[in-house]
Image (cartoon, rainbow, N blue to C red):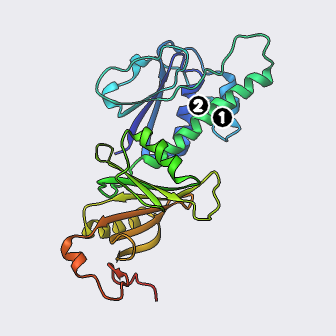
Amino acid sequence: MPLTILFLCVANSARSQMAEGLARALLGDSAMVLSAGSAPSQVNPHAIAVMAERGIDISGHRSKPVTVIDTAAVDLVITLCAEEVCPVLPGRVRRLHWPIADPASADPALAEGEVRARFRSARDQIEARLLVLRGLLALPEGPAGTEFHASIRVADLAASARFYAWLFGTWPKEWTDRYVTFLRPDLALNFVLLAREGKALHHDTLFHLGLAVADRAAVIDAYTRATAFGASIVKPPRTTWKGTPLHELWLADPDGNPVEIYARLTEAELAARPADDEPLYLVAGTAPA
């Protein structure tokens, strides 16, 4: 059953009309798309022109009042007003607000090219938001996390420890000459500062991100879910005893940032630690040759 999405603004002449055309093109059969306004007028010619630049024809669109919409059939309403008062859709419906400045202008000092540029900017802002929405529709269920972990490298461990102690409102749980660990159970936060140790620091000093799950079985389940989702698997599920003993799975996000799905070992699992400390791969056929 496709999702029914309604885009709303005041005149239903520019932003909501462009959103309707873009959404139909980008979302296809996954959504039924509508638009309306609280004071409808007519589709702005500049909106028609900049959409044609994308190969999308909205010349047959008509401005419509909200009153003609069957609100009971709407699953998601997206309002696009910025400086105006947006129309209100009554009822229990999921709502998003994307404030996009009205590209139309009655200012005679604006040349046609400037007005057209404003419409292109509004179109592109709406398109970028729709691309995110497209990726969120029919999103499969991910692993059930219990805490979020992040590690970053810092130039001055003491200075950074002071800053993050202030930011989180708590002393670190522990620290050594190489790292400082902050825990905030109410935030499900596990945050680690790592000493520079000669490594180059730049705008992206992220070491890795991590999501804790319940146990060994949950790490294996996360692998199954990640594979079905199409996530990049860097290291398949394994039990490792070097460093902090963990069951772990390593993924990479779309930019290549490392993400660890991990579970701490039970006392019984720790007691089974092998003498050679070699990792144990948890899914058949995933161990490196």
54 horizontally vs 155: left or right:
right
Task: Answer above or below: position of 28 versus 215.
Answer: above
Which residue is the extreme one toward the left?
Answer: 268
Where is residue 27 shown, x and y percent of the image? Answer: 49, 45
Q: Secondary structure at mark 1?
A: helix
Where is residue 51 shown, x and y percent of the image? Answer: 66, 34
Few, some or many C-alpha atoms within 10 Å of disc 2 (few <14, some 14-19, many ≥20)? many
278 horizontally vs 38: left or right:
left
User: Which residue is pictured at 39% across the width and 18% down the height?
Assistant: 88
Residue 18 numbered tag: 2
Few, some or many C-alpha atoms within 10 Å of disc 1 (few <14, some 14-19, many ≥20)? many
Which image quadrant is residue 249 in? bottom left
Which quadrant is the N terminus positioned in? top left
Instruction: Tell which of 185 and 182 is nearer to you.
Output: 182
Residue type, numbered disc 2: Met
Residue 286 numbered tag: none
Q: CA distance from mark 1 to mark 2?
A: 7 Å
| Earlier sequence position, callout 1 versus callout 2 | 2
Which image quadrant is residue 266 in? bottom left
User: Which residue is pictured at 59% across the width and 31% down the height?
Assistant: 18
172 horizontally vs 83: left or right:
left
Which residue lies under the disc numbered 1?
Answer: 51
Q: Secondary structure at mark 2?
A: helix
Q: Residue 39: in sight, yes or no? A: yes
Residue type, numbered disc 1: Met
Residues at badges 1 and 2 in contact (C-beta under 8 Å)?
A: yes
User: Which residue is pictured at 29% across the width and 56% down the height?
Assistant: 144
Task: Answer above or below: position of 201 versus 106.
Answer: below
Instruction: Tell which of 91 and 2 is nearer to you.
Output: 91
Where is residue 181 shown, x and y percent of the image? Answer: 40, 55
